[in-house]
Amino acid sequence: MNDTIVKFGYPDTLVHDYHNWLVLLRPQQVTLGSLVLACKEPVKQFHEVSADGFGELKTVISDIEHALSAMVSYRRINYLMLMMVDPDVHFHVIPRYPDPLEFDGRSFADAGWPGPPALAEPTDTDAALNAAIITRLKRHWPVPGVNL
């Protein structure tokens, strides 16, 4: 796995593993269900992703949006490809909503709503809470051929 994937907590933060992509829970929850979509290929520029990787991206994004919609009922979703500090191809996936959401006794506000996500203002979580979020996301993850 590349350095970016490891930095975002793999394997502890793994939500779903695809052939070319990993979906990880973002350790800093900007909003409830914030994810990292990381390419497993050894590429530093988006255009270097293989045709197979680009083709698979449609399924990955559909699955992400299905699971997050079921869990968070987001109003909007932001895919941020920043890659300034972590150069391997990846996106920060931030579900957006106007009103705070409750999960496991914790309130998760979207501090940037309705503007850009407030990346520097995440909700404090710990390993146990992040594991609970991962478990809930996995419950909503589509099963191929079943809940499309």
Image (tube, rainbow, N blue to C red):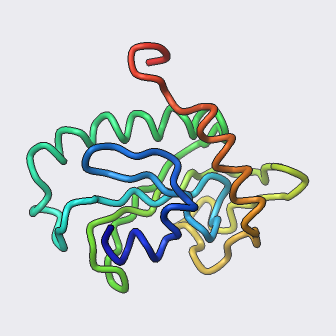
| Residue depicted at 46% across the width and 45% down the height | 16
Of residues 93 and 25, the one drawn nearer to the viewer in this rendering: 25
Q: In this view, does 35 lie above or below 7?
A: above
Q: Does 82 sit left or right of 131 as displayed?
A: left
Of residues 78 and 40, the one drawn nearer to the viewer in this rendering: 40
Q: Does 64 sit left or right of 135 as displayed?
A: left
Q: In this view, does 6 lie above or below 18?
A: below
Q: Is residue 32 above or below residue 116?
A: above
| Residue depicted at 76% across the width and 51% down the height | 99
**Residue 80 screen position, x and y as percent:** 39, 64
Q: Quadrant of residue 59?
A: top left
**Residue 36 screen position, x and y as percent:** 45, 60
Q: Name the residue at the right extreme.
A: 105
Quarter of the picture containing the C terminus is top left
| Residue depicted at 13% across the width and 43% down the height | 52
Quarter of the picture containing the N terminus is bottom left
Q: Name the residue at the top extreme.
A: 146
**Residue 6 screen position, x and y as percent:** 43, 73
